[in-house]
Structures are given as structure tokens and as C-alpha cells.
Image (cartoon, rainbow, N blue to C red):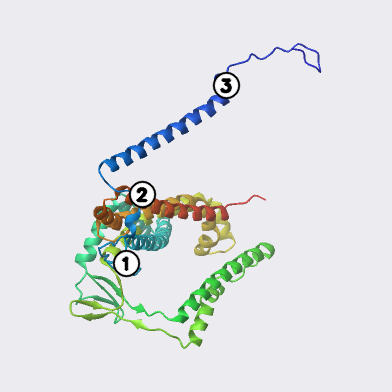
Amino acid sequence: MTDRRSGAQVAEKPKTAFWNDRDVRAVLFQILIVLGVLAAGWYLVHNTLTNLESRKIATGFSFMEREAGFSIGESLVPYSAADTYARAIWAGIINTLVISVIGIFLATILGTVVGIARLSTNWLVARIASIYVEVLRNTPLLLQLFFWYALVSEALPGVREAIRIIPDYVFLSQKGLRIPHIVANDIHGWMFALFLGGFAATLFWRRAAAKHQEATGKLRPLFWPTVGFLFGPAALVWLFAGAPLELIKPVLRGFDFQGGGTFSPEMIALLVGLVTYTSTFIAENVRAGILSVSKGQWEAARALGLPNNRSLRLIILPQALRVIIPPMTSQYLNLTKNSSLAVAIGYPDLVSILNTTINQTGQGIEGVALIMAAYLTVSLSISGFMNWYNKRIALVER
């Protein structure tokens, strides 16, 4: 073979069989793996359907429209034993979401405080925080749930000797936490809409303040404008409407309280257990994130005359978030999935209600599939939000 430009003879590359080509083999192997997975999946599904048919076990989700016939001890949505299985499952999903959202919020606050406390220059504070982390992090969560449930149901006083946290309004006893119940009013819907509008205005104000600081170097106030945007319009509407507020207070009658809202012992024990356990891992994430920021940042803040609390809030934590957020996402997912242990102490979460449904209907595969789909949806939602937030705070090169 002759090169057209130089006229020199160039040796021809020997032709190889296509199965010896590295790129072809890579594609071929991937195709074979996909076909193998599909074949295994088809075999499992076909074998399962065949066995179910031979045992005369019905398949499908038509059972969800049948009457459930069992009660739920604690539900945030209206439910009775005469409702359908679908309604019962929905009540379980809401219970799981409430525990997860409240748990994530409280665990984040507690974990951040403990993580900062571990870095305190005060010897006693740092040691107490270290003991808290090491003891709870290295103890099985299920054991902690049993401990907190026993503490709530046995150590607290009976109903007649309930602890009056706020006299005539909030009571704590072996039957749980009793709080006043707010009677719904039409004005509350407008207040909620104004609150959402105030939230949007707060985001706009904070973004404008950040751009103003970047352009001029001057800080704009954030705390009081945020309070004003969030609560100001709603509070004004409430006042102009005559300040409607009707509370149904819990009243001791006979052997229990009547009226008001209730946080059951199971819910309290589950929430305390999840929050304290997850906060230990979050505390370590926060501590690692703060330590990842160079000491020069602290020294520069002190040189500017900033106190330690403002240095931590304005300089150190914003930089540490880029290290804290990714592992924090995993802890949020762990808390959500660990909430399934509620079945061990009797809290009616999604897993508990679907276990009862499976026992009554025999639809085990469908029940497990619903559990997997629910937790997968929640986990992907949390991951998506945290990934968005992580990208939002990421450093952008100029």
C-alpha cells in the first residue's frame, strides 16, 4: 500500500475477525448480559404466575377496592373499618410520610447541634457530645425503639397524674401527648395561601439580597424580612377577620382525656428513636464538613473581628455544606427506610398496615410490591431534591 502524499510504502494492517475486536466484544457482552437478565426475569415471573394459578391464588390489585374490615389505631386521614384496603394503605403512607418529614427536620437540627458541640473548646460539652454519639450510633435501632417505648409507656405517669406541660392545654402521660385541636375555619385556607406567597417572596428577597451583596459588598437584613413575608400577610388577614381561633382542649373525663389531638406513645417512641439515632450520623457528617474547611478561614474571620458564632454561620458552614450534603442525603434515606421498624412497637405505618392486608387477603406479592414502590418513590424524591440542592450550593468557577 502506497501513501499518496509521500509515495512511501505503508504496511497494511492485518484484518482481524470481528469477535476479536475489543469494541465489538464490549457491545456483544452487554447485549448478552441484558438478554440474560430479561430471561431470568421472565422465568421468575412465569414460574410465579404458574405456581399461583396451580394453587388457585388470585393475582392483581382488585382487592384494594374491597372492605378492609380492620381499624387503625392512629390515622391522620379519616378512616374506619368499613373503608377499602386502598384507603387503609393511603392512611399508612400518610403516617409514614409524617414520621419521615418530622424526623428529618428534628434529626437535622439535633445532629447539627451535636456535631458542632463535638468541636467545642469546652471539655465537658465535647465529651458529652462524644458519648452521645458513640453510645447511640453503636446500639441497634430496634433495641433503642424498644427502650423508648418502654420508657414512654412505663416510666411516665398515668392519665390521672399526667404531666401538665402547659396547664389546661398540653398533657403528657402513658397514653401519649395530648394537645389542643384547632377547629378549621374558612379563613385558614386564605392564611395558608398567603403563607405560600410569603415563602415565594422570601426566596425572591434572599436572592436579591445575595446579588446586592455580590455587587456592592453590603449586607441586607434577612431575618426580619423573612418573618414579615412569611407571617405578616397571614396575621393581618387573621386579625381583620376577627382573629377566629377555636380550640378544643383535652379534658380528663373518667379514665382518659376527651377532645384535642393525640400523639400516641408508639408515635412518640418511634420519633424519638429515629431522631436520636439518625442525629448521631448527621453529627459526624457535620463535624467532618466543618473540619474540611481550612483553619485559615477561621483565622481570616477572627482578623475581620467576627465572633465565633457569626464566623461559623456566615463563613464556615456555607463552605462545609458542600461536604455535608451528599452523606446527609444518605441519612435522610436511612431514616425514611428505618421508619418501617415501627411495626415492632405497634405504630400503624405503611408496612404494618400492608402486613395486615397481606394476612387477610393472601396477596403477598402485591403487598410487597406496594411497599417497595412506596419507599422507592419517597427515596427517589428525597434524592432528587437533595441532588438539586447540592448542585445549587456547588462552587461555580468563573
Q: Looking at the rendered structure, which numbered label has been put on residue 75? A: 1
Residue kind at label 1, given as amino acid type = Ser
Closer to the chain start, of discs 2 and 3, is 3
Q: Which residue is mark 3?
A: 21
Q: Looking at the rendered structure, which numbered label has been put on residue 381? A: none
Q: Position of residue 209 (x, y in %)?
A: 62, 67
Q: Mark 2 and 3 residues: CB-CB less than 8 Å, in contact?
A: no
Number of numbered discs on residues = 3
Q: CA distance from mark 2 to mark 3?
A: 42 Å
Residue depth check, mark 2 versus mark 3: number of the one nearer the observer:
2
Check disc 1: other Cα within 10 Å, few if <14, some if 14-19, many if 20+.
Answer: some
Q: Residue at x 41, y 33 (%)?
A: 39
- Mark 2, secondary structure of its residue: helix
Closer to the chain start, of discs 1 and 2, is 1
Q: Which residue is mark 2?
A: 369
Give the image quarter of residue 83: bottom left
Q: Residue at x 29, y 50 (%)?
A: 363
Q: CA distance from mark 1 to mark 3?
A: 62 Å
Q: Mark 1 and 2 residues: CB-CB less than 8 Å, in contact?
A: no
Residue depth check, mark 1 versus mark 2: number of the one nearer the observer:
2
Q: Mark 1 and 3 residues: CB-CB less than 8 Å, in contact?
A: no
| Residue 55 in the image: above or below residue 321 | above
Residue kind at label 3, given as amino acid type = Asp
